[in-house]
Amino acid sequence: MSFQLLAAQTALVLSFLGMIAIIGKKIPALSQLPENAGRDQEGYLLKLKKKAQEVNPLKGTKPEIFLQKLLSKVRILSLKTDNKAMDWIQTLGKRIEKKNNNFFHQIFPEEKSPFSRPQQPVQENKDKDNYWKDIKESVSIKRKSRARKAKKKQILQSKKDD
């Protein structure tokens, strides 16, 4: 046997004997403890469940709103991941092109490189401007309707006071 194997076996045996000695010393102390020592009437899981209900982050929100926010965050994360993966694919493709000395273009001279990003249609600035204008108009409409409701309440209150 080699020295390393012998050293490992002795360490294993000594560790096992040490564990037996520690357990042997603790058995009398453990046997003197009552059966319910350290336990409350309620279990640990019930306490944890009560604390979770007290600290409920969804207490003031509707589940649909929470789900909408969660799904939008998941969507953003997946888009970021996809974008990063596309960047890695593109850089790897460029490295392969350099190594192969433009081998792909020698075979298919009329086609683009398979590692380039697909061309996305460019949106016109008008579409973007209309988008924000629509949002501003919807917000102003909501404000106007709130103001009308407030005026109606004031009129009703003044009639009740008379």
Image: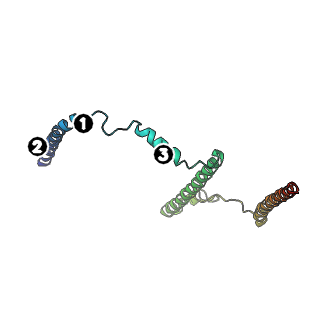
Image point 15% across, 43% down: which residue?
18
Left or right: 19, with 60 as reference point: left
Q: Report the disc number at residue 51.
A: 3
Q: Residue furthest front?
A: 162
Q: Mark 2 points at which residue?
A: 1
Q: Which of marks 3 and 1 precedes in the sequence? A: 1
Percent position of residue 146, x then y: 80, 58
Label 1: how many Cα within 10 Å (few below 14, some 14–19, many 20+) = few
Percent position of residue 149, x then y: 82, 56
In this rendering, the answer to whether 63 lies above or below 138 is above
The amino acid type, in three-letter code, at marker 1 is Leu
User: Dot 1: what SS?
Assistant: loop
Q: Which of marks 2 and 1 precedes in the sequence? A: 2
Q: Name the residue under label 1.
A: 33
User: Dot 2: what SS?
Assistant: loop
Tell me how far mark 1 sits from mark 2, CA to CA. 47 Å
